[in-house]
Image (cartoon, rainbow, N blue to C red):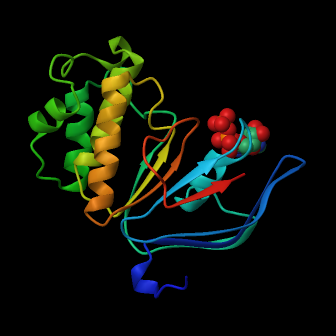
Amino acid sequence: MLRGVTEVLLSATGLGMIRGERVLFTGVSLSVAPGESLVLRGSNGAGKTTLLRILAGLTRPEAGEVVRTGLHHWFAHREGLKPHETPRTHLGLWAKAWGSDSDLDSVLAQMGLKRPADVPARYLSAGQRRRTALGRLLLEKRPIWMLDEPYTALDAEGRELVLELIEDHLKSGGGVVAAIHGESGFVPTNEVVL
Ligand SMILES: Nc1ncnc2c1ncn2[C@@H]1O[C@H](COP(=O)(O)OP(=O)(O)OP(=O)(O)O)[C@@H](O)[C@H]1O
């Protein structure tokens, strides 16, 4: 279905990428409209992270173009927490950078981080670090979420939490692009298999 530009949050046409001696993908076109989700599939090394980085504007494709019509949240493999940062100082820093008026204590509670709120990242568990990074999604409403393996290291409750965040975001007219191995927990609007 053809959509008007204003109805699309993110679109890409004819994306191609080379890494080393290998053509990772060619001719990748996609679009994400409000309320839509796109799941990227493919084996290890297929190029999912690379495609996400291109969609986020972090890596330049060898071919094709990407159009984003709004701001996006980027959630990657590496959480971006410095060893001395605590969940509270990390989220506080981003809240300040974005001019967010979100209540930090509520965000920490929602992410299940009340107890370790003041523990430096070097002592946090892998799941607690992921929860901290995911808390950034709640600090500012941004139409596009780009998530690289959002469930990694999370327990069942954490997975449920992320799923709820994704579903709420989609219901409120946001769009999601996620690289996910295994069960996504939701029925994506579209899938791209690399
Ligand atoms: N900066 C880079 N320079 C050279 N090769 C790279 C670079 N980044 C990624 N690659 C290579 O590109 C390929 C795709 O990597 P990518 O991380 O996109 O795969 P992926 O599908 O996300 O894999 P996984 O499921 O393991 O996370 C890999 O072979 C990787 O080694």
Left or right position of 134 against 138: right
Q: How many numbered circles are shown?
A: 0
Q: Nearer the viewer, residue 135 or 41?
A: 41
- Residue lying furthest bottom: 4
Give the farthest residue toward the right.
21
Residue 61 place in picture, x, y as percent:
70, 63
Residue 130 picture quarter:
top left
Q: Which quarter of the figure is the N terminus placed in?
A: bottom right
Residue plotted at (43% across, 33% down) = 79
Q: Position of residue 156 (x, y in %)?
A: 36, 24
| Ligand 1 location (quadrant) | top right
The image position of residue 102, as x and y in percent, is: 12, 48
The part of the image, by quadrant, that contains residue 12 is bottom right
Q: In which quarter of the image is residue 190?
A: bottom right
Q: Which residue shows up at 71% across the image and 35% down it?
A: 44
Q: Is residue 119 above or below residue 78?
A: above
Relative to 140, residue 174 above or below: below
Residue 126 point in image, percent of width and height = 41, 19
| Residue that extends furthest to the front in the rendered view of this protein | 187
179 and 94: which one is in front?
179
42 lies left or right of 181:
right
The one nearer the camera, 27 or 19, is: 27
Residue at (74, 44) in percent of width and height:
46
> Is the residue 7 above or below the residue 159 in the image?
below
What residue is rendered at 43% in x and 72% in y?
33
Could you tell whether 96 is left or right of 191 in the image?
left
Name the one closer to the observer, 157 or 125.
Answer: 157
